[in-house]
Image (cartoon, rainbow, N blue to C red):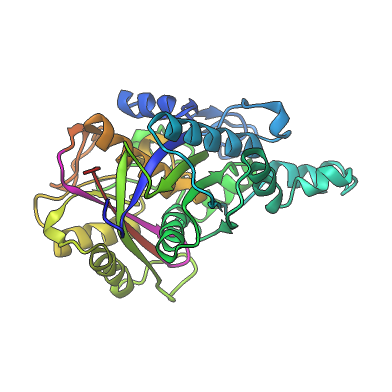
Amino acid sequence: MDSREMAICGIGAVTGYGWGREHLWDGLTSGKPAAGLEAGYGASPEEPGWVAKVADGGNPVDGPSRFARAMRAAAREAIADAGERGWQPGKRVGLLHAVVLGEVDLWREFYLDRGGDVRPREYLGLMPSTPMSTFMQEYGFHGPAMNVSAMCASGNAGLLTAKAWLDAGIVDDVVFVATDVSATQENVRHFVRLGVAVTDTEPLEACRPFQEGSRGFLVGEAAVAFVLSRNATRPYAIALGGAMNHDGYHVTSVDPDLRQVRGCFRDALANAGVPAAAVRYLNAHGPGTKQCDTAEATILEQEFGASTGVYSVKPLVGHCQGAASAVEVSVAALGYDRGYIPAPPAVAPGHPQLLTGRVPVGDGLTVKSSLGMGGHNSVVVLGPPA
């Protein structure tokens, strides 16, 4: 492996499809969305609405919340998976946790149901440092441990931070987890009010990235984990490089001149040392909103060739907020391993380069873009293992 490359050695996932990476892959391959009708998510608290929530599950020892259990379950699955594929941890294993809203269910209970009267141990469980500390103890890891937060771009941000640690020689390996289990009725309702989330229509009808008639995204939840290393014998995929920048423009809107978005794509390719012509797949942010889809379609047409296909799995898995780009990276990595991309089925006229259904994967590169709310632009360049 080139000294600048980082391998994805293991993958773990908890999503609306179920607890485990195979549930995610099988669900995506089926072409059926993970979202279901949930009470209280409609136009009023009495009406049901569509949302892709993580079901109850996991190990009760990991804590009372779906957040804590999902984070640890995904990380353990990734570590076990990496071990089965030949990875052996070095002396300095670091932990990165991407999180935007953590333990929302427990904080809601803390303030509204229990009036702040909890035992000290329960209070410590609300802190973002606690799941990281207990996980490092469980595995005897002693590298740095840090939270990463860049809204919807947090998954890409975590991958780029892990690569920076490896490049600097700070760590030998990184376990990276992105967790977002924050789809409470209150949170979802505010995204609906912002005009970007949809709960009153079936997923494939509401969320149609790069297709006519798209209204926005369905909200999803997920925890996804990777083992990242340069000591890999059978990796899923290789991270060649990437870039991040910020629009500095608006708290929700993309700067219409796309200067920073375009620069982020170009910087990512330069950092990876590859030409745009080598990119065959744009694994897009693709939330189904007009401004984001227009921005990425413009970049696709102006920066890449006609042979570059575009897809977004948000119609199937939902928009998993702080874990969104991590879920989507896992799909690209698993696709290289299994020989195809499980792109969502098209339901309306769309962009001529839109990929739909099972798409065979060759040896071309994947660009994974994520345009996080508030101006967080991020791009990671992925390729198949050598």
Can residue 309 be seen?
yes
Identify which residue is drawn at 54% across, 59% down: 149
Q: Is residue 258 above or below residue 320?
A: below
The quadrant in which residue 304 appears is bottom left
The residue shown at (11%, 58%) is 277
Q: Quadrant of residue 262?
A: bottom left
Specify whether residue 39 is painted magenta. Answer: no
- The residue located at (74%, 48%) in the rendering is 126
Query: Residue 4: image x %, image y %?
Result: 31, 60
Question: How many marks on residues?
Answer: 0
* Residue 95 placement, left or right of 84: right
- The residue furthest front is 91
| Whether residue 198 can be seen here | no
Q: Quadrant of the C terminus?
A: top left
Q: Is residue 362 left or right of residue 96?
A: left
Residue 35 left/right relative to 38? left
- Report the residue at 31% width, 26% height from top: 29
Q: Position of residue 306 (x, y in %)?
A: 9, 53
Depth check: give the residue in front, 386 or 34. Answer: 386
Looking at this view, name the residue that lies furthest to the left: 306
| Residue 66, image x, y percentages | 64, 34
Q: Position of residue 266 (x, y in %)?
A: 24, 68
Q: Looking at the magenta stretch, what is its main secondary structure?
A: strand
Q: Nearer the viewer, residue 131 or 292?
A: 131
Q: Is residue 366 left or right of residue 27?
A: left
Span colored in magenta: 362-376
Q: Nearer the viewer, residue 142 or 280?
A: 142
